[in-house]
Amino acid sequence: MSTPVDPFIACRPGVLRHAWDEVPYDGKAPAFGHVMLNRCMRCGCERRCLVSRVTGEIITRWSYKHPEGYLRAKDATDAAPTSAEYRRMYLAVLLEKEKPKRAPKVHEATATKGKGLRLA
């Protein structure tokens, strides 16, 4: 039995990571900072951070909102995969997509009239 494919594998550390897009923030921000709200175009994860209006430095990243199923359940013996392990998982997905589709077998032409080739 094969391991189920992680639907968020492209966004994992060591793979492609999140594909952030800017989203308008309609909340209230302090006078000294600008709230940047980003959403991943692949998985829908949201990130909010406060940026200094003067220096452009990130003052704080205070919020991540992950899609359901993104966070891994952990126990005392469960370690998150390494970046290399995530890349191997992603590579397996890519190779599976690239696998050529098997063409049907073609038998030698028969001498029957009007029937042409027969597929197995």
Image (cartoon, helix red, strand yellow):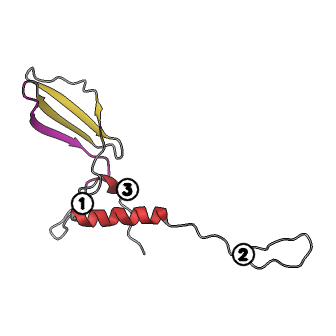
Name the residue at 13% across, 39% down.
61
* Corner quadrant of residue 104: bottom right
Q: Quadrant of residue 59?
A: top left
Asked if residue 105 lies in the magenta stretch, the reply is no
In depth, the one of 44 and 69 nearer the eye is: 44
Label 3 sits on what residue type? Pro
| Residue nearer the viewer, 74 or 7 | 7
Which label's residue is closer to the chain start, 1 or 2? 1
- Mark 2 belongs to which amino acid? Val
Q: Which residues are magenta?
A: 54-71
Mark 2, residue position: 106
Secondary structure at numbered mark 1: loop
Q: Position of residue 65 (x, y in %)?
A: 24, 42
Which residue appears at 14% of the width and 24% of the height?
29
- Kind of residue indicated by mark 1: Ala
Q: Residues within 10 Å of mark 3 (few under 14, many from 20)?
A: few
* Label 3 to label 1: alpha-carbon separation: 15 Å
Q: Which residue is mark 1?
A: 73
Cα separation, mark 1 vs mark 2, equals 50 Å
Q: Residue furthest top?
A: 31
Residue 56 part of the magenta segment: yes
- Look at the numbered discs 1 and 2 and tell me whether their residues touch, using CB distance below 8 Å: no
| Quarter the N terminus occupies | bottom left
Among numbered discs 3 and 2, the one appearing first in the sequence: 3
Q: Which residue is mark 3?
A: 7
Per the image, label 2 sits on a secondary structure element best described as loop
- Looking at the image, residue 42 lies above or below residue 109: above
